[in-house]
Image (cartoon, rainbow, N blue to C red):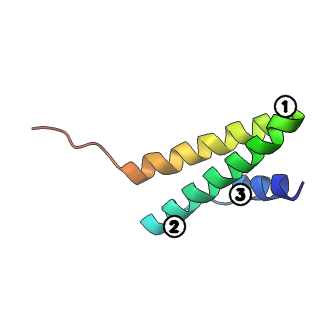
Amino acid sequence: MELIKKALEFENRKMRFPTTSDRILASREAKSLILSLNEIYKENKDKKIMDIMKRLTSVKQRIEKRLKGKPLTAS
């Protein structure tokens, strides 16, 4: 259950990453939490764990969207 506490703490943390390296570290942390929770979910099939994974995935997607930046527009 320590992993679930870690995931909830990550989710509730302020998502303000001033540097690119901070964003990369946050994305990697989210990915590792999601994969670890997935291993627990495979055994338990607990709906609460699935909900946590979904929320972490949306946070991770927002971070990665910021990492990729705005697409260049052709003039």
Residue linked to disc 3: 10
Q: Which mark is on residue 22?
A: 2
**In the rendered image, the vertical position of residue 15 relative to residue 48, given as above or below:** below
Q: Tell me the CA gap for discs 2 and 3.
A: 14 Å
Q: Residue at x 82, y 43 (%)?
A: 40
Query: Is 43 left, or right, of 23 in this rendering?
Result: right
Rendering coords of residue 30 (x, y %): 63, 53
- Report the amino acid beneath label 3: Phe
Q: Earlier in the sequence, mark 1 or mark 2?
A: 2
**In the rendered image, the vertical position of residue 70 relative to residue 22, given as above or below:** above
* Element on which disc 3 rests: helix
Rendering coords of residue 56 (x, y %): 67, 45
Mark closer to the observer (1, 2)? 1
* Element on which disc 1 rests: helix
- Report the amino acid beneath label 1: Lys
Q: Residue at x 81, y 38 (%)?
A: 41
Q: Earlier in the sequence, mark 2 or mark 3?
A: 3
Does residue 71 appear in the picture of this structure?
A: yes
Query: Is 61 left, or right, of 2 in this rendering?
Result: left
* Element on which disc 2 rests: helix
- Report the amino acid beneath label 2: Asp
Q: Residue at x 77, y 35 (%)?
A: 51
Q: Using the image as rendered, state which of residue 72 and residue 42 is in the foreground.
A: 42
